[in-house]
Amino acid sequence: MFFLPLSLKKTSFHLRNSRRLLRLFSSSPSFFEDAALFPGVDNFGLYSVILPEEPFIFGVSHIKPRMVPNHINRPAYAIRDSSGREAAQDDAEDVDGKFPLGGEAERKLRSVASLAKSVREYAGSLAKVGTTTNAIDAAVHDFIISRGAYPSPLMYNGFPKSCCTSVNNIITHGIPDDRPLEDGDIINIDITVFLNGYHGDTSQTWLVGDVDLPGRLLCGITNNALEAGIAACGPGQPFKNIARAIHTIIEPQYHGMNFCVSPAFSGHGIGSAFHRQPWVLHHLNDEPGVMLPGHCFTIEPAIIQGNHPTSWIFPDGWTASTENCARSAQAEHMVLITNDGAEVLTR
């Protein structure tokens, strides 16, 4: 869960045109002749477009965070001293993001990754027609704290919820709300938990009810792209090979459809810190750096329908939508580089 903020100018443009966007993308295919707003727009299937509610509210200060019992150990960013400043965090990893294999750090990392997997699968079981994303967030919150862990997204840079729920055209960082899930939605639920000083991070995009063929193909190619990226991992392998492997999956047409990867969101090192080096780019790049034993990081490509990977941020400052309202799907695993290979900790 990591994003590069977009310009306020682009956000302002989309807010001015939000009602027209909703009319355009919720209409029948014949209405796409009205698509001068976004040249080259395609018909990506039948689904509801998610747009910010009006009147627009900027920021998230109006959203009340869920309570966490005092006995739950919190990450540093969720702790403030008497002056109101965030507590400092001591990272267990070295400057390159590695930690020693075979010891207590690895044991704790494996344990929190296993818990994150369990939470992810539980969250997916809740993705049903009529359920609100707020209800999913509440259930996930209770599930996490009942296991003595802290929901890492809660209060991370002010994020007000315990997980991210990104529906249809939302790429990532969707804030749970009171919209009921509809038949034909797709929803990415991004889970991160903090236990015994370490974070575990994973996500999956789930089908809600009867999803159309383009939506099912999107989710399928997203998981294929993730697996291709994982297959490129191992000690001594360049990090840039992850993106190259992903592009071997998404560059050819898939069942006659085009797909692209969002360049605005990356994978990241994870351990005692939520986000840190190494940064894992999913778009083609020539960045230096190789994987070394002790590196633990996420791979989390966000795959978008069509050939337009651009995005914009809602007034809440978090929710990222595709610019042309095409659907996006994301899947994420934690990968640990060992002395002789790579292991997926959240499988």
Image (spheres, grey):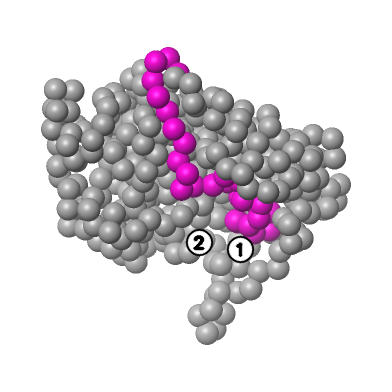
Q: Relative to 214, say whether 13 is above or below.
A: below
Return the x and y of residue 300 as percentages of the image width and height: 55, 40
In the drawing, does residue 314 fall left or right of residue 288?
left
> Closer to the camera, 17 or 159?
17
Q: Is residue 176 visible?
A: no
Q: Which residue is mark 2?
A: 156
The residue under label 2 is which amino acid type?
Answer: Tyr
Given residues 68 and 21, the one toward you in this image is 21
Q: Residue furthest top?
A: 255
Pointer 2 local density, CA inside 10 Å: few below 14, some 14–19, many at least 20: some
Q: Do the residues under discs 1 and 2 have CB atoms within 8 angstroms?
A: yes
Disc number placed over residue 65 in the picture, else none? none
Q: Position of residue 190 (x, y in %)?
A: 49, 43
**What's the distance in space between the residues labelled 1 and 2, CA to CA?**
9 Å
- Magenta range is 254-281
Please state if 133 lies on the left or on the right of 288 as rendered. Answer: left
**Furthest-bottom residue in this view:** 83
Q: Main secondary structure of the magenta part?
A: loop
Residue 277 falls inside the magenta stretch: yes
Point 39% across, 39% down: residue:
309
Check disc 2 and report its element: helix, strand or loop.
helix
Q: Residue 89 lies in what quarter of the image?
A: bottom right
Q: Is residue 182 left or right of residue 136?
A: left
Q: Position of residue 129 (x, y in %)?
A: 33, 30
Q: Which mark is residue 75?
A: 1
